[in-house]
Image (cartoon, rainbow, N blue to C red):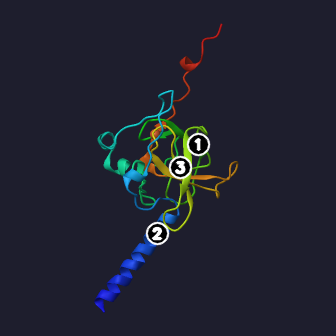
Amino acid sequence: MIRWTMAGALAGAALMAALALAACGAGPAGPAAERTGPMQDDQGEKLVLTDAEWRARLTPEQYRILRRRGTERAFSGTLWKEHRDGVYVCAGCGQPLFDARTKFDSGTGWPSYFEPIDERAVETEPDRSWFTVRTEVHCARCGGHLGHVFEDGPEPTGLRYCINSAALEFRPRRRHDASDDPPRD
Ligand code: FE
């Protein structure tokens, strides 16, 4: 009887976890070998590191999300409630990914944007984990897993890039400085 109850509780917990993840995140990480790393291009712009190098470079949480397709719990990250003006860069390689001007409050507990800062900054691929098909989003430069994109976002794109805080770093925008202007004749 006790064993039966525990089994039910465990099944319930697993279902709850699956439902929570369905909102944004990926399921448990698959074997690292399944991932083909980012392709080296002729320009040498891609950042390709070994697994050991990524482990050394990233915090354990960043590594879990970026390199193992992990997902942080909703409302647990540091950036879903970040409202300052600035740019969000990849925590793996520093490439600018999202502009604060495209961020909106999705109510999901993950930072959400209606478009990337540049269409070439991110890449997508189908993610068939957790009995559903979602569109995974990763950094085009280092291949780091960022989150997923859904078609229920606000105008003007109708897209919702649902991104893990741990995959990003926020860089506040400097106030305009006249010295930044190009010299005028
Ligand atoms: Fe990156």
Asked which secondary structure carries label 3, the reply is strand
> Mark 1 belongs to which amino acid?
Pro
Query: Which x, y percent locates residue 82?
Result: 49, 47
Mark with earlier residue (2, 1):
2
Which residue is disc 2 drawn over?
18
> Can you identify the residue that label 3 sits on?
137
Residue at (43% x, 36% y) in the render? 93
Q: If the image is split into quadrants, where does the N terminus sit? A: bottom left
Q: Residue furthest top?
A: 185
Q: Residue furthest bottom?
A: 1
Looking at the rendered structure, the kind of residue marked 3 is Val
Q: CA distance from mark 3 to mark 2?
A: 19 Å
Camera-near label (1 vs 3) is 3
The secondary element bearing badge 1 is classed as: loop
Q: Is residue 43 above or below residue 28?
A: above
Image height check: is 128 above or below 94?
Answer: below
| Identity of the residue drawn at 41% across and 40% down | 92
Amino acid at circle 2:
Ala
Residue 116's disc is: 1
Q: CB under 8 Å between callouts 1 and 3?
A: no
| N-terminal label among 3 and 2 | 2
Q: Are marks 2 and 1 in contact (CB under 8 Å)?
A: no
- 137 vs 119, left or right, is left
